[in-house]
Amino acid sequence: MNEAFLQILYQHETLYRIDTTAMPAAAMVAQAAPAVENRPQPAINQDITEPAIVASAMPVLNHQVLILMNEAPAQFETDQLLLHKILGAVNLNLEGVDLLNIHGSQQLDFRAALNTRKVHHFISFGVPFLTVNLDIMMNVYDPKRVKGVNFLFADRLAVIANDNNRKKQLWNALKALFVGQ
């Protein structure tokens, strides 16, 4: 199974991998379930493989602030109004940032964003960084600097809009990134 998928699915859980190659097949069956009766097993197609995920290249970025979202078009319109207010609080506007809504996109590869030095702030609203091929594990509203880029992972804007506590957490994180410089 794809390791990145498992990291997204079980972010805060400890997972253990059992080495089944060192165990004889009879021992694995005995551990899995007690033998009830000997029934014929269905044939298993051994040729099944996981589909290859082809990551597309990173889009062209024009600004130092990159904001990432994954919202349906109707929700994206609503979120832009809230985002406009949030950015205004730190003296930014929608025209001065790269706003990417990856809804319906192929898997994107943002690893080059770390090497180009074009992006200084990478803010994700509800999109785990593993989704864009960045192996960065973060706590929500806890900015982290990696290779000269400030990363911030926040809840989706629709969630933040209805929760004053999350609005305060976002404001404190944005102050640390933009006002405290």
Image: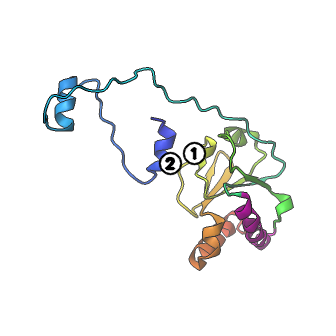
Label 2 CA crowd tier, 10 Å (few <14, some 14–19, many 20+): some
How many circles with numbers are drawn on the protein?
Answer: 2
Residues packed near mark 1 inside 10 Å, few (<14), some (14 to 19) or many (20 plus): some
Residue located 57% across and 62% down the image: 142
Q: Using the rendered view, name the quadrant where residue 76 is placed.
A: bottom right
User: Given the image, on which type of amino acid does mark 2 rest?
Assistant: Ile
Residue at the extreme top: 47
Of the pair 116 and 77, the residue shown nearer to us = 77
Choose top left, top right, bottom left or bottom right for residue 82.
bottom right
Residue 6, placed above or below residue 165: above
Residue 151 placement (x, y as % from top left):
64, 54
Q: Which residue is mark 2?
A: 8
Q: Residue furthest bottom?
A: 164
SS class, disc 1: helix
Does the CB distance between marks 1 and 2 fall below 8 Å? yes
Disc 1 designates what residue? 130
Q: Is residue 97 above or below residue 88?
A: above
Task: Please tell me whether mark 2 sits on a helix, a strand or a loop.
Answer: helix
- The vertical placement of 72 against 106, above or below, is below
Q: Which region shows up in magenta?
A: 73-91
Residue 123, percent from left and from top: 68, 57
Left or right: 127 with respect to 101? left
Could you tell me the amino acid type at mark 1?
Leu
Image position of 21 (left or right of 144): left
Residue 13 in view: yes
The residue located at (47%, 45%) in the rendering is 7
The quadrant of the picture occupied by the C terminus is bottom right
Report how far apart the C-alphas of labels 1 and 2 lie in the structure. Answer: 7 Å
- Is the stretch drawn in magenta largely helix, strand or loop? helix
